[in-house]
Image: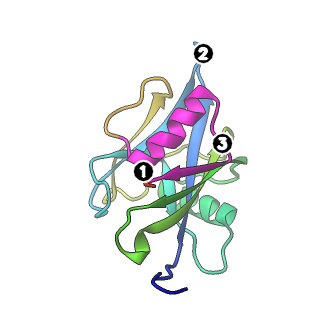
């Protein structure tokens, strides 16, 4: 490969808790990020984080949900894989695994108040602003019902 620099892909898993409302709509649980150094002040998936070495994407999603919002026994459904780039540093090459869950054990709560300023349910049709941009792409696809298995952001 002449002239090209190889990069390492950083994997992450996201958990979007969904619930149906009495009015017939769907709500998603989002957290307001703070003091993380990335997209602070933006609304984001209730639980998300890097996949650790030797860990599957599903195991990472379950671990993050327990660590960040104190829920377990998630009925995870794969939603999409997103390849994204910021066209800058090698660490900016990402693959994100998004999962939804409509059932779990425990009541979602803020476990890491230093990183999460708020945790709230929002109708998929009335999301707060701002939402982390690449996550907004996934939420829009869920709202429309046309989220493809593979998505891209930043290209």
- Magenta span includes 17: no
131 or 101, which is in the foreground? 131
Callout 2 crowding tier (Cα within 10 Å): few <14, some 14–19, many ≥20? few
Q: Which residue is identified by label 2?
A: 22
Q: Dots 3 and 1: beta carbons under 8 Å?
A: no
Q: Where are the magenta residues, as a range?
A: 131-153
Compared across the picture, whether 18 is left or right of 118 comes to right
Q: Tag 2's secondary structure?
A: loop
Compared across the picture, whether 119 is left or right of 8 comes to left
Q: Residue at x 58, y 27 (%)?
A: 144
Disc with the residue nearer the chain's start (3 vs 2):
2
The residue furthest bottom is: 2
- CA gap, disc 2 and disc 1: 25 Å
In the picture, the disc for residue 110 is 1
Quadrant of the image containing the C terminus: bottom left
Q: Residue at x 39, y 59 (%)?
A: 112
Q: Position of residue 36 (x, y in %)?
A: 31, 62
Quadrant of the image containing the N terminus: bottom right
Callout 3 crowding tier (Cα within 10 Å): few <14, some 14–19, many ≥20? few
Q: Position of residue 85 (x, y in %)?
A: 44, 62
Q: Which residue is identified by label 3?
A: 148
**Which color mode does the image show?**
rainbow
Q: Tag 3's secondary structure?
A: loop
Callout 1 crowding tier (Cα within 10 Å): few <14, some 14–19, many ≥20? some
The residue furthest front is: 2
Q: Tag 1's secondary structure?
A: loop
């Amino acid at each position: 490969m002449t002239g090209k620099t190889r990069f390492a892909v950083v994997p992450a898993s996201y958990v979007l808790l969904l619930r149906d409302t009495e009015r017939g709509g769907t709500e998603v649980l989002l957290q307001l990020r703070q003091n993380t150094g990335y997209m602070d002040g933006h609304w984001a998936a209730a639980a998300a984080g890097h996949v650790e070495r030797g860990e599957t994407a599903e195991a990472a999603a379950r671990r993050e949900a327990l660590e960040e919002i104190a829920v377990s026994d998630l009925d995870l459904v794969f939603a999409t894989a997103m390849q994204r780039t910021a066209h800058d540093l090698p660490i900016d090459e990402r693959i994100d695994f998004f999962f939804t869950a409509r059932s779990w054990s425990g009541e979602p709560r803020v476990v890491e108040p230093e990183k999460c300023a708020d945790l709230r349910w929002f109708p998929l049709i009335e999301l707060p602003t701002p939402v982390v941009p690449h996550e907004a792409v996934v939420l829009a696809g869920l709202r429309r019902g046309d989220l493809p298995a593979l998505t891209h952001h930043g290209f």
